């Protein structure tokens, strides 16, 4: 057997063994709600955390693939606002503007738990708590004089804990990077606006707006999983 083939089969065996060993949590599904705060990131606020925070809340669903991996969907509603008077940079002709929006966030993420997450299976070293990271994709719709609809990519970190059997609480912080530069433009203005304040049009890697969410969630487990031998 060639060395490359041996390495391939070794990796395949390791993957199968690993996923079998951490087959699953006891319950397949979680559903619940989340509450927290949101703030805008863009031309009027490049780096300042929690500048003009708004309220955010909604519902989420999580499918637990195994102890380490989960897939989550969310439907959230929140508010963001911004004002160029708070910005550290100077805009052309010292022009100023402000905005506020109510947005709807529909998205999905893949989560990775750093610890095997469960309040049972102690013989597999499972823990009722774990930090985690996540990334995914979604769509944001926002109201205003100029409507906004665009896709985004979320990245974030969090921690979750099983309060008791089937009841989970968690905290997470995420940044939603939008594929658009007019999230902070609520009025049609042909002369000047935050979609291109310096006359430089945005691209997929430049001058994109976004927003951040800091959320506390509470979920309930359901859909008990059958023994792997019987699935």
Image (cartoon, rainbow, N blue to C red):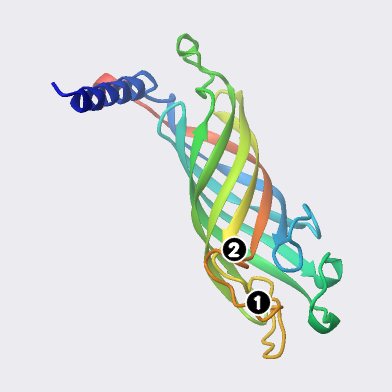
Name the residue at 67% across, 51% down.
Answer: 213
Q: Is residue 153 left or right of residue 34?
A: left
Query: Is residue 104 or residue 150 the one in the foreground?
Result: 150
- Which mark identifies residue 104? 2
Percent x, y for residue 218? 62, 38
Q: Quadrant of the N terminus?
A: top left
Q: Residue at x 57, y 48 (%)?
A: 155
Residue toward you, 99 or 155: 155
Q: Quadrant of residue 228?
A: top left
Point out the residue furthest to the front here: 3
Q: Going 51% across and 46% down the picture, which residue do you hit? A: 135
User: What's the mark number on residue 195?
Assistant: 1
Is residue 220 rendered to the left or right of residue 80? Answer: left
Mark 1 Cα-neighbour bin, 10 Å: few <14, some 14–19, many ≥20: many
Q: Nearer the viewer, mark 1 or mark 2?
A: 1
Would you place residue 144 above or below residue 165 in this image?
below
Disc 1 or 2, which lies upstream in sequence? 2
Q: Nearer the viewer, residue 143 or 93?
A: 93
Placement of 86 over or under 124, stated as above or below: below
Residue 62 percent coordinates (x, y):
48, 41
Q: On the rendered image, what quadrant is the C terminus found in? A: top left
Contact? badges 1 and 2 (CB < 8 Å):
no
- Which residue is the extreme one toward the bottom? 190
């Amino acid at each position: 057997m060639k060395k490359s083939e041996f390495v391939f089969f070794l990796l395949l065996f390791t993957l199968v063994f690993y996923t079998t060993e951490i087959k699953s949590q006891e319950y397949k599904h979680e559903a619940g709600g989340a509450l927290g705060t949101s703030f805008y990131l863009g031309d009027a606020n490049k780096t300042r955390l929690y500048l003009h925070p708004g309220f955010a809340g909604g519902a989420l669903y999580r499918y637990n693939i195994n102890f380490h991996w989960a897939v989550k969907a969310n439907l959230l509603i929140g508010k963001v606002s911004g004002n160029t008077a708070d910005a550290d940079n100077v805009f052309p002709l010292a022009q100023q503007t402000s905005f506020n929006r109510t947005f709807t966030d529909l998205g999905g993420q893949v989560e990775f738990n750093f610890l095997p997450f469960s309040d049972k299976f102690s013989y597999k070293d499972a823990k009722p708590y774990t930090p985690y990271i996540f990334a995914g994709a979604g769509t944001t719709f926002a109201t205003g004089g100029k409507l906004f609809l665009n896709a985004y990519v979320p990245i974030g970190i969090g921690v979750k804990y099983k309060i008791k059997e089937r009841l989970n609480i968690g905290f997470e912080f995420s940044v939603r990077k939008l594929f658009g530069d007019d999230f902070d433009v609520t009025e049609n203005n042909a002369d000047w606006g935050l979609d291109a304040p310096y006359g430089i049009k945005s691209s997929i890697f430049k001058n994109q707006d976004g927003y951040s969410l800091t959320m506390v969630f509470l979920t309930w487990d359901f859909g008990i999983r059958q023994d792997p031998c019987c699935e």
